[in-house]
Image: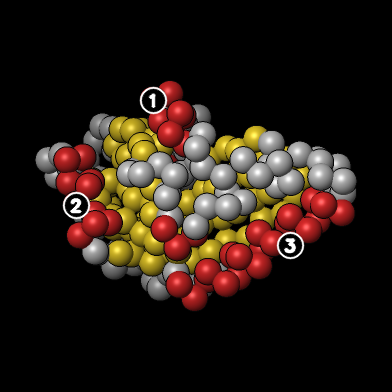
Amino acid sequence: MNPLFVVRTVLILLLAGCTHVPVSSMIRLARIDPATTDPAQLRAAVKLPLVLEPREMSLRLSVRISGGSDEAQDFRLREVSAPNDVLALHAELEANTRIFAYMIDPTELGRLTAFRESLKQNQRARGGKGGSVTISIHPQACRTDELANGPIYFTTYLRTAETGGYVPLARNLDLRTMAPGRDIAKEIPRCADAGPPDPRR
């Protein structure tokens, strides 16, 4: 772990606000150093019911440096189909589900590298104080048909050079119950009515 950059790392893959990380994944996730990990090797994946379609995904890198203000930037993700990116997830498939895998859009890599460097310089200027990093994935989604009554499960994954494979971050979480007092499933638009993806994400 690069002491100039972070003391504590929180890695969460978000679908509509989920922040649950399985205990079995924490050891592998602890190997990741956001200050040095190769962003070109990062892969994110999501398992969804067939009725749901991801429209666009972005990675958000949020940094909180002790004694300083919070900083965050979003980076576009691009869907990948290379066998080595998706075959490892086939064992995770269940009836009526699909898995989508993503990488950081190559056009964003330079901007991400520059952002990391600026954060390290900022921390050095503040005397090397510790902080925290949150890596989150923000998807836009739509539905191709009416959602059935009952739970709407999804699972999310992260892979980096350090983990050596995909690590489940949120397994079989229910969209209907993950936000207290709010049924997120009811907020998902039909794909035919959703319009183009939000260019700001």
Between the residue at mark 3 and the residue at mark 1, the CA separation in whole angstroms equals 33 Å
In the rendered image, the quadrant that contains the N terminus is top right
Residue 19 visible from this viewpoint: no
The residue at the point 34 percent across, 50 percent down is 45
In the picture, the disc for residue 24 is 1
Three-letter amino acid code at the position of disc 2: Leu
Do the numbered discs 2 and 3 sit on residues whose CB atoms are within 8 Å? Answer: no
Three-letter amino acid code at the position of disc 3: Ser
**Labels 3 and 1: the sequence-earlier one:** 1
Neighbours of disc 3 within 10 Å: few (<14), some (14-19), many (20+): few
The residue identified by callout 3 is 118
In the picture, the disc for residue 87 is 2
Give the SS element for disc 2.
Answer: helix
**Labels 1 and 2: the sequence-earlier one:** 1
Give the vertical position of 180 relative to 112 (above or below): above
In the picture, the disc for residue 2 is none
